[in-house]
Image (tube, rainbow, N blue to C red):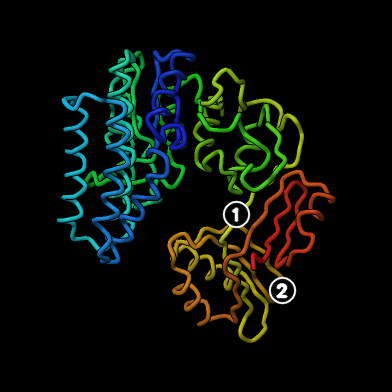
């Protein structure tokens, strides 16, 4: 049993859909679950639909039209016969989405987000499943929301592993080719859709692999494997042949974009190897994440996070920042859903670099100012370097305003002002 995951870049247009079939032809496709993301940048487009809907702007119809036209053009190219059943199925899904927008009474944005954005994966998997069936790759389409059961913490839910295990064991035939959605689950009380976080399709693949005792997970990317840095931001990158679970979890924790932070933990528990390979060159070996060497080759690994917020606190009376003060800060960070990327404290100050994912910074600052002196910098960049050399750090910081630096034996973190 194998689990493959294809991300948005690998299903971004009609030719990419055809390429998935070529990859499956190269690898074989029996005894397999294939997890699919939304096509291209469709998640971003559906987020625009959420924004226009929540803000009651008059551009909702235009944003919705972009969703329709993008998918319709792909369908038209893949299925030239207008009598094909995918046309009616696509229309039915669009009507479901329109009905939600028309009849929804909730004002909770995370709930609204999950119900709307989830259609990206529903569209992509139905289109891919229909195409594969047409060209001879017989498969079963599976609604992952019927399998992955979660709590109702929309946009960032916890998986109910016991219920999920039972549903996957019940619904997946391990001898078939199954096509399902990444990113999606459903809460256990009312079955409303939940999403597992951005890049959560990797996590979906790991969940299915864990529950099915898969032999391997393969994540197909537009890069040859796991690189030591993001090629969009660094000109010189190195392919990592092998990465241990521990090292990969460290990289994921600090925000390496190739692997979702939650993906590796269930795989490690059952020692299921994860491969990252290129859908452009499926014959390549890619990167293996599993037991063995910590890192091969041994090189520095760079992780960059833009648009962070650095908040620095000190007590109003310049007394020590003791445990009860810091405990209050973490309580409020949790309350306002701030993801903590870096912390540093001294006798009279406490600094934290956070990701303002849910746009609740004004509320957090208001609360903090009731108890502390507060300074903050928005739009800062956080660099995390594993196994860094002194020369590399000097080169990275040359000519830049360093707001905070923290160093341990294996990791250096630097907050730099983007201005």
Question: Looking at the image, which residue is at 33% across and 36% down?
Answer: 148
Mark 2, mark 1: which one is toward the viewer? 1
**Relative to the observer, which residue lies in front, 22 or 314?**
22
**Above/below status of 43 relative to 53:** above
Rendered view: 70 above or below 383: above
Labels 2 and 1: the sequence-earlier one: 1
* Residue positioned most to the bottom: 317
Which residue is identified by label 2? 347
Q: x and y percent of residue 82 in the render?
A: 18, 27
Can you give x and y, in whole percent of width and height, for residue 216 in the image?
51, 22
Residue 117 placement (x, y as % from top left): 32, 48
Identify the residue shown where x is 46% and y is 74%.
Answer: 362
* In the rendered image, the vertical position of residue 194 relative to residue 138, given as above or below: below
Q: Secondary structure at mark 1?
A: strand
Label 1: which residue?
A: 305
Quadrant of the image containing the N terminus: top left
- Give the secondary structure at mark 2: loop
């Amino acid at each position: 049993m194998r689990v493959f995951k294809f991300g948005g870049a690998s299903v971004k247009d009609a030719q990419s859909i055809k390429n998935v079939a070529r990859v499956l032809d190269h690898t074989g496709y029996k005894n397999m679950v294939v997890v699919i993301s939304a096509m291209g940048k469709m998640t971003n487009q559906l987020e625009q639909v959420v924004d226009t809907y929540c803000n009651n702007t008059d551009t909702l119809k235009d944003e919705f039209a972009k969703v329709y036209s993008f998918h319709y053009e792909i369908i038209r190219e893949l299925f030239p016969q207008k009598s094909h059943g995918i046309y009616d199925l696509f229309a039915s899904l669009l009507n479901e989405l329109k009905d939600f927008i028309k009849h929804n009474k909730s004002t909770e944005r995370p709930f609204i987000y999950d119900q709307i954005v989830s259609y990206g994966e529903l569209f992509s998997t139905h289109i891919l499943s229909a195409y594969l069936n047409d060209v001879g790759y017989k498969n079963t389409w599976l609604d992952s929301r019927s399998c992955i059961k979660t709590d109702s913490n929309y946009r960032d839910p916890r998986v109910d592993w016991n219920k999920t295990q039972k549903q996957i064991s019940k619904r997946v035939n391990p001898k078939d080719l199954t096509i399902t959605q990444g990113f999606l689950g459903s809460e256990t009380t009312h079955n409303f859709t939940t999403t597992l976080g951005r890049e959560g399709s990797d996590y979906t693949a790991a969940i299915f692999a864990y529950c099915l005792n898969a032999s391997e997970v393969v994540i197909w990317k537009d890069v040859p494997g796991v690189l030591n840095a993001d090629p969009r931001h660094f000109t010189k990158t190195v392919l990592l042949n092998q990465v241990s679970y521990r090292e990969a979890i460290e990289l994921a924790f600090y925000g390496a974009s190739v692997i979702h932070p939650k993906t590796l933990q269930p795989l490690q528990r059952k020692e299921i190897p994860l491969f990252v390979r290129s859908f452009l060159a499926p014959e390549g070996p890619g990167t293996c994440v599993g037991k063995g060497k910590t890192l091969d080759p041994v090189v520095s690994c760079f992780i960059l996070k833009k648009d962070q917020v650095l908040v620095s606190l000190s007590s109003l009376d310049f007394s020590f920042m003791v445990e009860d003060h810091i405990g209050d800060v973490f309580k409020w960070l949790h309350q306002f859903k701030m993801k903590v990327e870096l912390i540093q404290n001294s006798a009279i100050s406490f600094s934290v670099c956070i990701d303002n994912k849910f746009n609740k910074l004004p509320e957090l600052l208001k609360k903090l100012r009731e108890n502390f002196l507060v300074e903050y910098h928005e739009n800062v960049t956080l660099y995390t370097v594993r196994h860094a050399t002194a020369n590399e750090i000097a080169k990275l910081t040359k000519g830049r305003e360093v707001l905070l630096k923290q160093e341990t034996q294996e990791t250096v973190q630097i907050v730099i002002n983007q201005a």
